[in-house]
Amino acid sequence: MYNIPVLKRIFEYKKDILAIILLCLLSFVFLNNLFLKSQIFTSQDLGQSDITHYNFPNMNFYAQEIKAMKIPLWTNDISTGFPIFAEGGTFFLPNLITYFLFPVYLAYNLNYLIVFIVASIGMYFYCRYLGFTRFSSLFASITYSFSFVFIGQILHPAVLQAISLFPWLILIIDNYFQKGSRIYLLIFAVLFSQQYLTGFIQCVIYSIIAIYLVMFIRYFKKLHFAKNIMLLTFACLLTVGISGIQFLPTLELYAQSTRSFSAADTSRFYYTLKDLMYFVNPFFWGDPSKATYIRNPVEGLFWENNIYSGILPFIFLIIGFLYFKSKKILRPYIYLFFLSLIFSLGWFFFLRHIPPFSMFRLPQRALFLVSFAYAIIAGFGFDQVFNILRKRISDRFFIIFIGLAIIIIAFLDVFLQGRGYNGGISKDEWLKTPETAEYLQDQKISGRILSLGGADNWFYVYNNISHGWRSENAGKLLATRAMLAPNTNTLYGISSFDGYTAFETTNTALIKQLALSGDSDTERVIEIGTSSAKLLGMEGVQYIVSVKNIISDSNDLELVWQKPNPDTKSIYKIYRNKQFIDIIHPVNKTVIEYSTQQMVNDLLSTSFTPKDAALIYDLNPVQNFPDEVSITNIRNDSGDISFHTVSSGNSFIVISESYYPGWKTLVDNQETDILPVNINSMGLYLTAGKHNVRLFYDPNSYQLGKIVSFISLLIVVAILFWPIFKKSLSVSSAERIGS
């Protein structure tokens, strides 16, 4: 029966296949509510949630674009326009496939399942590669993939996707160092590029440093070590090339962002010795999901600092440490464990000023490396204890029962501790449109909104009403989305002046600071001055959503809607900005500016009227234009704006969309220049008469990135097939000589 090669192979590895099936089953069991009850997680952070305010809205936009066979390069719904593609995730294959094939909520949940399956199976294979038994490999796999490093980071799918690939990366490169086959290098380069394409570069940097460290310790004294390290470096460079389609736009965004000239702030949310208590109790300092967390979050974030993997793994971790001197195979992982832990504690403080470490606010995200090493050491400790039991107990079935019992207990530990932490409610309730959004949709607004006081409202409900985000309380906290804080607004087809992004451009940050400068915000009242209303109107802000009372001049803001919400015990209000200017509008004159500071001063001047004037960096003197300019047939899609103009003389048109590299303009199908206007908007000169105008976002960084990625993939294919081609040439040469 087993003479058929495939069946013979399957039978040979049937126990490993059963182990893989078990890990898939455990992953589904852990996430069962997402599928059996069609739920979406309700996990929160501080004042908002990276699920509700960032990941889900962004992936919803992503899915819409992918289903329409478009690359989501730009969104006009946040930050007065933002290059969302540059933040990553578009070409990560699980995202690409699931969001194209399935409804958004299902694709979102499927990616969690993929994460846990990929992480657990990768960890299992690596432990088997290291010579662990199947039971100890299963134990190590559960220790890593179901730890609170994963459970706590449910908030951050990109982080989970990146760290789920790490066991596979180190498995593949370890095979290369062991066997010398360069096909492993090519597989590594392709898979490593996928880790980069998840969009979370911090984990990518930590991963490659850990890989170099482990390979150095494991193979430093081996033959060809220097050559292998050089080829590993080549593979890493090839990875950058393959991911060039993402790398270059991200590099461009970083260069335009506030992070490019200042190191990330690591003075808050740090990891301290207190957090070591998480090794033995995930809720030692309380449970944020029940609002019982007793520490100031500034001292440490639960979801970033928690590394709990269970009591049994901790016991076996201690046992594994006892073999440090006698078992060389453990040493790389013990070194990795302590070095990553020390780095997370911030003791390598000098690194915070050195790129790329200066880019990252939370060095404790290296805890996934601690967890990885932890799992291997604990798995080894389990292996030693299990081997002793096998020598002393002759009953094979009893031994199997003990092994399975330990594995199931280890899983149940983290399952029972962590299953409710992330909460969850039905997709229909989760996706329900807030009444504030319904009102604005009815108005068919052409401008943007600004949300004020959302974080305060969240904290009020969290502390006084919902008491966390679990079970029946989850919906109450989610009801604070009535504030339409970024990026939740995008779910309802409403554009926002503000945005929740990983990188904020310097122009966006500056105009936001100016637009809200001089205003006061107390517990119950927000005062907005005329200058702020004017600048917000200049940026296309048509409505302001607030839970607080807004005091302003009667010529600036008008209360147009308010309604109490019984779940949040709050009254949500919507104010109309009377200073609103159409996002695409003509001006009567342009005023030349010679510096950013001069432009800032003029923007804040009481004499500046954005409806009439545009401030530009240009060599032309002040120009005046006719009052009568007609703008019709306006279409404003993400990254593609078009309109028709008619004027009796020359005109200047302001487009209140973020000025950013990559925007191009066609006037009557002829390319023309775009000028930066009012710090963060775009403008263009038009001659008299009728014109068809189109602005579209087509960045050179993306186009060049496509070429770099294509060439890099060609290199991979060429190296892969070179031995076959070389052999074919040798055969042809031999035949010619023979003839």
Image (cartoon, grey):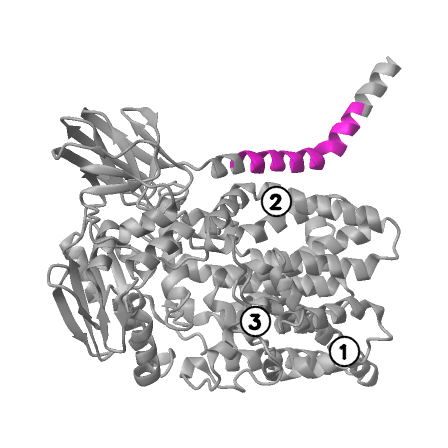
> For the point 67% across and 68% down, which residue is it?
348
The quarter of the rendered structure image containing the N terminus is bottom right
Nearest to the eye among marks 2 and 3: give it.
2
What range of the chain is rendered magenta? 706-729
Q: Which residue is mark 1?
A: 320
- Rounded to the nearest angstrom, the CA distance separating label 2 from label 3 is 27 Å
Q: Three-letter amino acid code at disc 2?
A: Val
In this rendering, does residue 525 appear at all? yes
Residue 311: image location, x then y, percent: 63, 84
Q: Three-letter amino acid code at disc 3?
A: Val
Q: Is residue 73 above or below residue 40?
A: above
- Queried whether the magenta region covers residue 718, the answer comes back as yes
- Queried whether the magenta region covers residue 524, the answer comes back as no
Q: Which residue is mark 3?
A: 149
Q: Three-letter amino acid code at disc 1?
A: Gly
> For the point 48% across and 51% down, which residue is it?
88
- Kind of element beneath mark 3: helix
Q: Earlier in the sequence, mark 1 or mark 2?
A: 2
Q: Earlier in the sequence, mark 2 or mark 3?
A: 3
**For the residue carrying disc 3, how many other residues have a C-alpha within 10 Å: few (<14), some (14-19), or many (20+)?**
many
Q: Is residue 735 above or below residue 708?
A: above
Nearest to the eye among marks 1 and 2: give it.
2
Residue 579: image location, x then y, percent: 16, 54
- Kind of element beneath mark 1: helix
